[in-house]
Every structure is written in C-alpha cells, then in structure tokens.
Image (cartoon, helix red, strand yellow):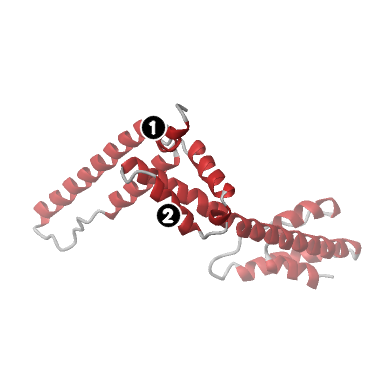
Amino acid sequence: MKNHGDKTKDMIESVLPSTARKQARERRRLIHKQARARQRVALAAITASCDDTSIDFRDGRRRSELKWMVLDRRAADNVGALTRWATAVVAADATLRDAPVHVQVAHFAAILPADVIGRHAVQHIESALTYLAQRPMSDARRASWRDRAAKRQQALAEALSQVIAQGRHRAFNNALRCAYREHSMQEPPPAKTRYLLGAHDIEAFSAEMANLDWVLDTARSST
C-alpha cells in the first residue's frame, strides 16, 4: 500500500493477475483447436455426401466450454483483499449497510474507474455482496434442512427399535425388499438400499436411509 489516496487503485489492481491465467490461455487454445477439428470433420462429411442439411455449424459445445473456462479463470482471481475491503466499506456506512445490493454495487461502480480492470473488480464485488446478502437465508435453509433430516433419522431409528423389540427383523427386511421392487418400476428409480443387519445397525441404517420416505413407511408398517 503506497498511501491512503492509492487504496482504491491498489484494491482493484490486486485482483490481477489470476493464478490460473496461463492454464486458461492453454485451455482456450485447446477448445478452439477441438472446435476446428469438429468443423473439418463436418466439412468432410458434406463433401462426401453432398448434403449439408444435417450439419450444425453453430457449435454450442465450444460456447459452453468457453463459458466454463471464463468462470474457472475468474474463480482463480485473487479477490480476497478486494472483497474484504468492499464488505468493510459497506459495514462502516450505515446507509450502504441497509441498502439493497444493487445500490451497494452502484456505489463501488461510481468510485472505481470505468475501464476493464475497474469493471472486473465491480463484478467480483457484486458477487461478494450478493453472497453476503443471501447468506442469512441460505444458513436458515440449511439449518431447517438439517433439523428435518435429524427428525426423520430419529423417527426411523425409533421405528426400527420397535421392529427389533417385536422380533420382526426378518419381516422388515422382506417388506423392504418388496417395497424396493415396487418402487424400482417408477421413474426415476429409487436409490440403492440395503437390509437392516440387526440392533447394532439401527443408527447407521437410519443415517443412510432416513431420506427415503418409503423406507420410513415400511419400518412403521412392520411394527
């Protein structure tokens, strides 16, 4: 850091260079090389058959591969210092802190230079601020999912404990096999299941199978 007046400039320039810039260039060359090879094959097919009605030169595969190459290249940018600075600026300003993401992004777009490096930095700032704004909701969804998963696992374990206590271990496994066969005729087919090995296997079995409704239903109907 040279001095306080250079902070904005230093922040945006800290994004470059990417740690994957050389690999990205090599990958781009390979993508274009493979696309040219496909085009040569297509042209050869036209020459041989004199029919170009079935040849598609739009090459969506190349566009898709280039898109992922750009995303991977961008993911390797050194954005830690930039995003920490941006989030600290937002946190220190009450107006920005309470503003929607697009207003926060507009603030940085106004103070950063309108050149390639500046626009590049704004894109990373927007991604970081969007993630920060959505994180509470994402955390809440994950916590809710974990809570539901834990309740389902507990319910299955309780049902299996009753199965074992009533001596219906074999009956449950037979019913599980029949239920699997029935569900295997559906689309999409069910995930692979396994038999309950015994009382010692209740915890592990419940952890693996609690996400399947029909396994829980089978356990409850076997008691």
Callout 1: few (<14), some (14-19), or many (20+) C-alpha neighbours within 10 Å? Answer: few
Foreground residue, 6 or 14?
6
Residue 223 position in % (x across, y down): 84, 70
Cα–Cα gap, marks 1 and 2: 24 Å
208 above or below 111?
below
Q: Is residue 178 visible?
A: no
Q: In this view, does 31 lie to the left or right of 203?
A: left
Q: What residue type is labelled 2?
A: Ala
Q: Quadrant of the rendered structure where residue 215 is? A: bottom right
- Around disc 2, counting alpha carbons within 10 Å, would you say few (fewer than 14), some (14 to 19), or many (20 or more)? few
The residue labelled by disc 1 is 17
Which is closer to the viewer, label 1 or label 2? Answer: 2
Name the residue: 39% across, 50% down: 110
Q: Describe residue 168's horizontal placement relative to residue 139 as left or right.
A: right
**Residue found at the far top of this picture:** 2
Residue 175 spot, x, y in % from top left: 74, 68
Residue under label 2:
106
Question: How many marks overall?
Answer: 2
Residue 204: percent from the left, percent from the top? 76, 51
Lower sequence index among marks 1 and 2: 1
Q: Nearer the viewer, residue 155 or 161?
A: 155
Residue occupying image coordinates x 29% and y 42%: 31
Instruction: Confirm or deny contact between disc 1 and disc 2 (CB under 8 A).
Output: no
Residue 203 seen in the current view? yes
Picture coordinates of residue 10, whole percent (x, y)? 43, 33
Q: Which element is circle 1 on?
A: loop
Residue that appears at 10% across and 52% down: 48
Q: Residue at x 16, y 46 (%)?
A: 40
